Amino acid sequence: MMRYSLFLLVFISGYCIGQTAVTDVSGREIRPPAKVERVYAAGPPASLLVFAIAPEKLVGWTRAMRDNEAPFFPDRYARLPELGRLTGRGNTANVEVVLNAKADLIVDVGSTGATLASLASQVQEQTRIPYGLFDGRIESTPGTLRALGRLMGNEREAERLAAWYENELEEARRRVAGVKEHPLVYYGRSASGLQTGGKGSINVEVLEVLGARNAGAEVRPGLVTVSFEQVLLWNPEVILTTDPNYWKSVWSDPRWRAVKAVEDKRVYLSPHLPFGWFDFPPGANRLLGVWWTGKLLYPQPFGDVDLRAKTAEFHRLFYHREPTAAQLDALLAEPGVLPK
Amino acid sequence: MNSRALSYVLAAGALVGLTALAFAVGRYPISLAELVSVLVGKSVSANVETVVLQVRGPRVLAALVVGAALAAAGTAYQGMFRNPLVSPDILGVSSGAALGAVLAIFFSQGIIVIQVFAFVGGLVAVGLVYWIGSRLRGHDPLLALVLTGVVIGTLLGSVIALLKYLADPYNQLPAITYWLLGSLAAIAPRDLAAAAPLALAGLAPMLLLRWRVNLLALPDDEARALGVDTRKLRTLVVAAATLMTAAAVAVSGIIGWIGLLIPHAARLLVGPDFGRLLPLAMLLGAAFLLAVDTLCRTIATIEVPPGVLTALIGTPFFLWLFALARRSW
Amino acid sequence: MLQVESLAYGFPGRTVGRDVSFSLGAGEAMCVLGPNGGGKTTLFRTILGLLQPHGGTIQLGGISLESLSRREIAQRIGYVPQGHSAYFAYTVRDFVLMGRTAHLGVFSVPGREDVELAERVLESLGIAHLAGRAVTEVSGGERQLALVARALAQEPATLVLDEPTASLDFGNQVRVLEKISTLAATGISILFASHDPDHAFLASHRVLLLAEGRALEIGPPAQVIRADSLKRLYGVSVEVLPLAGGRHTCLPELR
């Protein structure tokens, strides 16, 4: 009897410990408690994934839901408390708030560097709550989902989402595989449209997933400002933007009219609710950006992609709420989102 | 020709030469023949015309206007505050303009709104400083102004810092950061059409009153005893300088060092008489910013913030000039 | 030229002196003697219209001071301050030209005639050779003379000098006093403060003793400057010695 119980004890504890330890992207081993009920997501990309996997475990949003974002989420979740961001640029959360939230686990998804890793270790030491950092790149999303699933004890749900996401990415790549001529795309940010993302910059990841040519690729990674002459020199065929003021001004500004993309009326404005599709927040939400951009850049290979259906499916799986026809209309019918 | 006249001639010559050069160079390759054709009115390819008339032309002219405006304002303030280390920011016009622009960006407004907010912000900040400063009785009026300017400027700066903190780090914060660094990259013909008349409106009183402004360099009692209503004159000079600076900052963002360095350099060349100093300072300011901005837009694919270059180039140049000079301010 | 009647003067909220009355005719030089803090500068600033009087009247050439504009005041009365810290290197010529402002239109710049007048004034003070030099580079005495020149460029009927000989060497002190006498002889009314009673003897027609803001005595120097009045004014023992030719000098008795 004693031997049997001892064996059971060792087996169970081994099972518990071995089961849920995960190495995060900074190489740190994250050991969550046996049961994870409350997860604090330190930034919007993390919130999105935690919510997708197990919405009931998300303690709160980093920023309170705005009135135009809330209708996309189930009501009880839309009203979760605002806790602030913890690390990365613009951290506004108080560590005490985190403690007060009684989280079992803290996760962050996004950029991964030595500074962020040391910050995570520091907070972990202060709060005694395991803190994991995970890669936010589009292609790493399935892996991140799986890791989060293991940490949270929701492996089944996470696996479902990860497999689906992988499938979607695979399909997109397949469609684009046969394309010989990739169009030159310029991504214009800010009200002037003169900020863009350089090669490898997280802001233009969607383009790079599709293999499209980023006009700003000759520039170092990161956000940069360029001059009009440079844009004219590049003469992109398509312009994508996330700034509605810029999109509006492009049609009447004689300087932009000289650019091929404007001449051909191929300047598009990315949808932004509830999470942006193209650039920010830099999380899994950008999958919709992949479909949207694919349709705009490669009308033939992506011709039969039903954007409404894709959007509805993503919302269902990740936001846990089926969007109404009116909501889909509002998203897709906003001026600049789709070619007329 | 005496050294003073020589300074003017050289400055004007440098300006003309730099302007010609600025029109000729740029990221978009344009041959001299094409350039001349466009300027003369002959038709060339649409792109070349766009670059010359809509992009490069307004940018070059804006650099001249902004450089001259900042230099003029700096010259007026250095004389008025009797301190050669004063810049046009001393009464908070830049902080006010920055706050206006940051607010507009924070609320996701378009470019025109950002510029209007910046312009109004600059005027309101100085108005506030002036109103408070002149209410502080029993103090040297200039000291009261300076202290109030520093206090209000700091206050506005902390509000800006707060807004940066609260701004969306993915979207608004980069836009705010870039605006604060200053740039002429986005200059449109309409910006020039708005800024130039405003700057001229500020310049006119300064030119008309150029003799009287000299008397502000004297202690207040002496200037009044010589027949000058110092309060009125100071108000006018502040209003004129603020108008010029606010108009410049609204279209170019914050470009520092010109308002401080150029009047200094000009004074070392032609002395402190405002009537002689102002035109030279404007010539030098225009030439300097044009040179800097031309570098900013040609040395790399990306744009370099002009404020960085004005400081990098300006400081050693100024030290050199100062070492050469034999006289004091 | 200058008439002061029962003048009360001081700063906003604080009256420094009262009951000062005197009149100064053309060509008259009056020396104001008094201890530091006795109100000399404040009195002068009030007479120049730089401070509001607290009571009484001031008249310049028969016209009440408060009815005159800054410009009009500057055309009638010139101010030579005590010392001058120069911030900017204006040339002595430009510095003196500043005195012409009262006669220039608001938007005007000094013309040829103004420049010629300025040069004449410099000449008359013996500093024409300094015209092109920076005012920051001349000696203290030369700068004081430049200040006088600037005030004279205003072509005033009255000249007010606040301790013009302070911080000057002996030679320069004498030159300035000489200048005061000469100017008075040309018909200008002169009001000057001095820290040295001997200067009153040398260059003034009348003396005003000012202590604690009040005029103790007014009259010709020989009459007003006595051992007891100086004792009252400065609190020190001084002997007033008569000299040949009707002149006087003061000799302090050191204990």
Image (cartoon, rainbow, N blue to C red):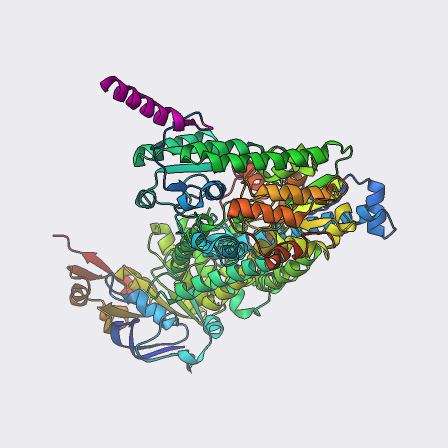
Q: Is residue B54 visible?
A: no
Residue A289 falls in image quadrant: top right
Q: What is the x, y in percent for residue B218?
A: 45, 58
> Magenta region: which residues?
A1-26
Q: What is the x, y in percent for residue B274?
A: 56, 56
Residue nearer the viewer, B212 or A333 = A333
The residue shown at (45%, 69%) is C186
The residue shown at (62%, 62%) is B198
For the view shown, which residue lies furthest in the front direction? A1
For the view shown, which residue lies furthest in the right direction? B42
Q: Taking A212 as reference, is C97 above or below it? A: below
Q: Taking A89 as reference, is B206 above or below it? A: below
Residue nearer the viewer, A100 or A59 = A59
Q: State the predominant SS element of the stretch in magenta.
A: helix
Left or right of A260: which side holds C170? left
Residue C11 falls in image quadrant: bottom left
Residue nearer the viewer, B288 or A131 = A131
Left or right of A153: which side holds C114? right
Count the marks.
Answer: 0
